[in-house]
Amino acid sequence: MGKPMADYVKLPEFDEYKEWFKDFADLKREDGIVQVTWKTNNGPMHHSGMSHRAMSQLTRWLSLDYKNEIIIYTHIGDNWMIESDANGWETYSKLPTERFQHQYFDDTNLIKNMIFDLDVPTIGAIPGSGFHWDSAMLCDITLCSEDTKMEVPHAQGGLVPGDGMGLMCQHYFGTKRGNYYMMTSRQFTAQQMLEWGMVNEVLPKGKVLERAWEIARMWKTMPYENRTIMSNLAKRPLKKLLMEDLKLHTVSEQYGSLLRIAAGELGDENSAQQDEKYISRVNDWRYATCDMEEPQTAESWRTMPKKATEWWQKVKAGEIENPYVFEHSNEPEDYEF
């Protein structure tokens, strides 16, 4: 047999791109099974323009490496993403080009790369409560801990809920129920997600990742070709959904944000639309209390920042404990309550 005129293109190996993404994810691979653990540096992932982009970029690189046969997406620690990087949104604010790239490309790629780029089986392993749960819920199957609660938070902050989470609620919950949770920001619990079709198993705290690896090893007993084809069938309904509606959703959120920027109404909790960098002010409170599990009202939306402030003051005074211990190390001086 003769020699080809040109060889296969040499792409980076696992250890090389693992190093590229070390600020945003820990990667490990055993017997073709890859575990992606989202983080920021050595702690919980902080939502930012940088993490947003890295998530979609990593998924694309994983898809190009044929040694990645099954992928598990999880988050460092006992919970999903809860915090926001207060200084991680400056490029998001630059008009027109950088804001356009973040919202037109990154918002869409974060969703579509999970479904259109990954041809292998995927498992979402959610260790606890948090937001921006897209990568876990877009997996072929999803597991969560019994204490998990989540929501589509955008509307309460004045944003159009168009980053894909509202679309997934409509898809998994049914249109009417999905609309309700998308449009009210009410939290849904692990048991509700199980009953309504968003997750497949609810597990005891601390057992989610162990179960994900058990399922991955079960799939490994199947022929490689067959389990890969099986995964394509699993993704097909979401491929059709995203082809129809994803770009409409993401562009709608972008359009609404640009209108608020033009009107000078994008800022902290007292503005018509809340800037992403202020999310951490209320998120610990949102997941540490049960307030958001109840039906929401104009009063509950309006008083949320005040309740969060009062809660934080009690935490600082030692009257109550914050279960989401985290060092708000990069917050500007005016970020104090």
Image (spheres, rainbow, N blue to C red):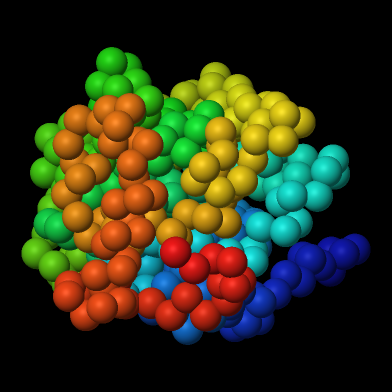
Along the line of sight, which residue is nearer the eye, 320 or 44? 320
Query: In the shown orientation, is residue 275 left or right of residue 37?
Result: right
Q: Position of residue 58 (x, y in %)?
A: 59, 62
Query: In the shown orientation, is residue 88 left or right of residue 124?
Result: right
Along the line of sight, which residue is nearer the eye, 248 or 212? 248
Along the line of sight, which residue is nearer the eye, 255 or 329? 329
Query: In the shown orientation, is residue 111 left or right of residue 290?
Result: right
Q: What residue do we see at 56% from left, 49% from top?
A: 268
Q: What residue do we see at 83% from left, 43% from top?
A: 95
Q: What residue do we see at 34% from left, 45% from top?
A: 304
* Residue 145 shows in the view: yes
* Residue 220 shows in the view: no
Q: What residue do we see at 22% from left, 60% from top?
A: 288
Q: Quadrant where the N terminus lies?
A: bottom right
Q: Position of residue 263 (x, y in %)?
A: 72, 29
In the image, residue 153 sits, relative to residue 328, either above or below, namely above
